[in-house]
Structures are given as C-alpha cells and as structure tokens.
Amino acid sequence: MTARILDGKATAATIKAELAERVTALAAKGVRPGLGTLLVGEDPGSVSYVAGKHRDCAEVGIASIREDLPADATQEQIEAAVARLNADPACTGFIVQLPLPRGIDTNRVLELVDPAKDADGLHPTNLGRLVLRVNEEIDSPLPCTPRGIIELLTRHGIELAGADVVVIGRGTTVGRSIGLLLTRRAVNATVTLTHTGTEDLAEHTRNADVIVAAAGVPGIVTPDLVKPGAVVIDVGVSRVTDPETGKSRIAGDVHPDVAEIAAWRSPNPGGVGPMTRAMLLANVVESAERSA
Ligand SMILES: Nc1nc2c(c(=O)[nH]1)N[C@@H](CN(C=O)c1ccc(C(=O)N[C@@H](CCC(=O)O)C(=O)O)cc1)CN2
C-alpha cells in the first residue's frame, strides 16, 4: 500500500479562490482587508516566507503593509512597529515573523499585538478563548498551522470525531495549540501530546489513527512508529544539506518509508506549509468581515 497524498498546495489554491470571492464581497461594502508583516533582520527563510505572504495577498486582493527592521533593531523599535500596525486602519490583521533575533523578548512583543488584529491566532487572549470556549463558535483568529491541518484533513474526507491523534512536539505554533482545536466538541478527537521528554514515543504513536509530527527532528517518524492505515501529517521544516547534491533542502519529520505503511500522508513541502499560508489569509479576511 502506498499512502494517498493530502495535497496542501491544491487545497490551499481552492481556499484562496474562496477567499478572493469574500474579498470581492467586502469591497462592495467599502472594506478592504489588509495584512501587515513585521520582519526583523534578513534571515533568508523569513525573508522568503514574508515575500510569499505578500504574494498570496496580491492573489486574493488583500492589501499589503510591511514593517521591515534591521537585525540590530532594539526591543523598543520592534514594539514601536507593533504599535504602528495596531494603529493603522488599513491593516486589519498582522503577524510578527518568527523567530525574532536573539536577545529580543518575543513573548512581550507578541502580547502587544491587538488581539483583534492577531492574524497568527497566537495572542494569549485568542489562545485563552480557545481554552474557555469548548462548545461555542469561535469568533476570533485561530492558530494558522493547526487550523490548516484540520482543514486539510476534513477537506480530504478524513473523520476526526473519535480519532486518536498523537501530536509530536510541544511548540506554541503547532504542538501546544493543535490539541485545543482538535478537542473542541465540534471536532471531537482525542489528543495525546508527546515531546522530547516522552519516554516511549512508539508506545503512543503505534496506536494513533492520526500522527501530527511537529518536532523539527528530520525523519523522527520511522515506519515502525506508525500503525498500518494511519494518517501522517508532516509539519517539520528542518533545512539540511543533501549529501549527494550538496544543496540545501527541506527535511520533514516523517521518514519517506512511512509512505508504505500509512493510508494518507501530507507531502513536505506541499502539505502543511501552503495550508498555513491560506489560513493566515482566512484570519485576515475574517477579521475584516467582523469589523465590517
Ligand atoms: N509569525 C509566524 N512566524 C512563523 C510561522 C508562523 O506560522 N507565523 N511559521 C514558520 C514559517 N512560515 C510562516 O511564517 C511558513 C513556513 C513555510 C511555509 C511553506 O509554505 N512552505 C512550503 C515550502 C517553501 C520552501 O520551499 O521554502 C511548503 O511547505 O510547501 C509557509 C509558512 C516560522 N515562522
């Protein structure tokens, strides 16, 4: 058996087309969503992710606002840029591109973002709403990568209600927050969060219907960790140098041989990444719709 592909690129393209229609509907009401980005420094990965976000905006008709600061920007300069984006009426949602340079208090910066403009859905107020509102509709931004993963699964007809999901990795953007979404009554999955302190990873993953690998450890999910017929989502993005070509490439957390065991797998690249970007646009459009 070779796993079927959860095509994030194609799914994201469909979502972007849907969002473009909503942007047109907003324009008829005189409202234009605008995404702001705050980029500090010139890390090539971050520069290219931010450029991608603005390309996506152009595709669906969202306005782009940029705050670019040098790598040696001070905490105060970064906080002032956040204040400008909070105050800018053209900016209906924005992100602070992570990671910020060493020495900057990231949590302090993120807490200064206006929760209504938090396009990443990672502000403590918005995460707190997810904790508190298990049964209700959520009318605030949701974390992009977890939301993108759930959207990818449901749009491929994968049932999450009653599924045993094992998450590997306890980072804020994925590991810690995805359980809050998956265990909502509307989704109804059962979630186990594993991490580097988990004594026997295989003991958990071998029983999982769905594995979400977000450890940032290339190839950590080997075939012996996977139940035949499971769904495997690869979130890891480690940059490695290919020994054969000498070129840098993305290495995911999932070993390629897992394709022979799993029923479904997300490719990497081409899986979770494009969905994260699409969900960022969805958060921006939705916050503009709420304010309209
Ligand atoms: N404020 C944030 N910072 C960061 C986040 C985030 O969600 N919010 N996540 C990552 C980077 N990231 C978005 O910012 C991101 C990374 C990768 C992709 C993506 O689409 N990747 C492509 C491959 C691209 C390539 O070849 O280089 C794919 O998976 O197909 C989207 C978003 C850290 N910072």
Image: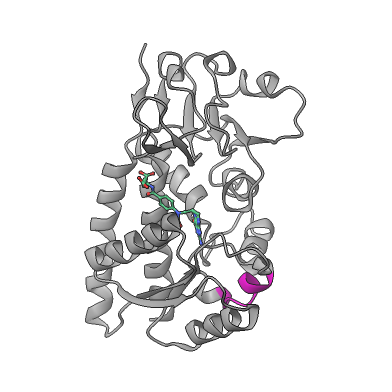
Instruction: Name the residue nearer the viewer: 269 or 179.
Output: 269
Q: Residue 260 in the image: x percent, y percent?
A: 41, 13
**Does 41 sit above or below residue 232?**
below
**Does 164 sit above or below residue 116?**
above
Dividing the image into 4 quarters, which one contains the C terminus?
Answer: bottom left
- Identify the colour scheme used: one colour
Q: Residue furthest top?
A: 1
Q: Residue 258 in the image: x percent, y percent?
A: 46, 19
Which residue shows up at 27% across the image and 63% down it?
A: 55
**Does 199 sit above or below residue 212?**
above
Which residue shows up at 57% across the image and 27% down it?
A: 220
Query: Left or right: where does residue 253 sit relative to residue 283?
Result: right
Q: How many badges with numbers are in the image?
A: 0
Overall secondary structure of the magenta stretch?
helix
Which residue shows up at 40% across the image and 62% down it?
A: 47
Q: Is residue 190 visible?
A: yes
**Does 289 sit above or below residue 235?**
below
Magenta highlight on residue 109 = yes
What's drawn in magenta, residue-wise?
108-115
Query: Left or right: where does residue 75 sit relative to residue 276?
Result: right
Instruction: Name the residue nearer the viewer: 267 or 285.
Output: 267
Query: Left or right: where does residue 30 sit relative to residue 127?
Result: left
Q: Quadrant of residue 227?
A: top right
Magenta highlight on residue 203 = no
Q: Quadrant of residue 68?
A: bottom left
Q: Is residue 21 visible?
A: no
Dividing the image into 4 quarters, which one contains the N terminus?
Answer: top left
Q: Residue 162 in the image: x percent, y percent?
A: 57, 31
Q: Residue 8 in the image: x percent, y percent?
A: 34, 41
